[in-house]
Image (cartoon, helix red, strand yellow):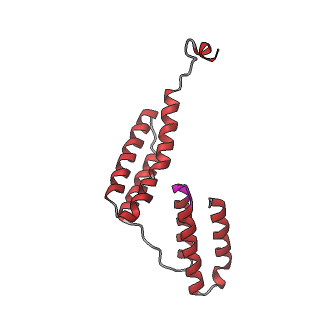
Amino acid sequence: MDYDQFDAAYGEVLAGARSLDATALESEVSRLRALAAELPSPADQQAAHLLIASLEDALGRPQPSLSPELAAAIRIQSTAQTTEGTPADRIQAIREAINQIAAIANTAPPTEQGPIADLNEPLHLLLDSLTSATSTPTHPQPGADDARN
């Protein structure tokens, strides 16, 4: 399941939502939740859940609330991803966020530990990108051509 497949399924439900009875609609929303859970990327899962929540809101259905642990981890992730400053400042903020999210995941209910820990994946990618960018030499190293020969 990729995000485009989820988006197509969401579009179908959205197009037919007003013509479905309450039972059928609830079944479709449950199916969308299951599809969203299958998305490999935590960011895609988060976007899918936001679409589902907006669908439920538009239809006047109650939205499942986020646990305090998951809400806190999402806030930490968002703050770390948008931190400005020098690369060193950003790297430090991301490392701190990764540690905070890991601590939250370790104390969260067992059913939420995995999804919370998965929020670190995009932070690790960003951290890798920043650390490789700051450690990449701007000038060729002496003898670099010798290593290729």
Which x, y percent locates residue 100? 35, 49
Which x, y percent locates residue 40? 55, 56
Q: Which of the 4 image quadrants contains residue 142?
A: top right
Which residue does the image show at 39% across and 41% down from the upper left? 95
Which residue does the image show at 63% across and 65% down from the upper left? 6
Vertical arrangement, residue 22 with respect to residue 98, above or below: below
Please tell me which residue lies in front, 115 or 80: 115
Q: Which residues are magenta?
A: 39-44
Which x, y percent locates residue 88? 42, 33
Residue 119 is inside the magenta segment: no
Vertical arrangement, residue 76 with respect to residue 135, above or below: below
Which x, y percent locates residue 38? 55, 63
Residue 40 is inside the magenta segment: yes
Vertical arrangement, residue 138 with respect to residue 93, above or below: above
Say left or right for 20 vs 114.
right
Say left or right for 91 vs 138.
left
Quarter of the image that includes the N terminus: bottom right
Vertical arrangement, residue 66 with respect to residue 30, above or below: above
Which residue does the image show at 60% across and 84% down from the upper left? 24
Number of callouts in the render? 0
Question: Which residue ends up furthest to the left in the rendered image?
Answer: 107
Q: Is residue 82 visible?
A: no
Which residue does the image show at 37% across and 58% down from the upper left? 72
Q: Is residue 102 visible?
A: yes
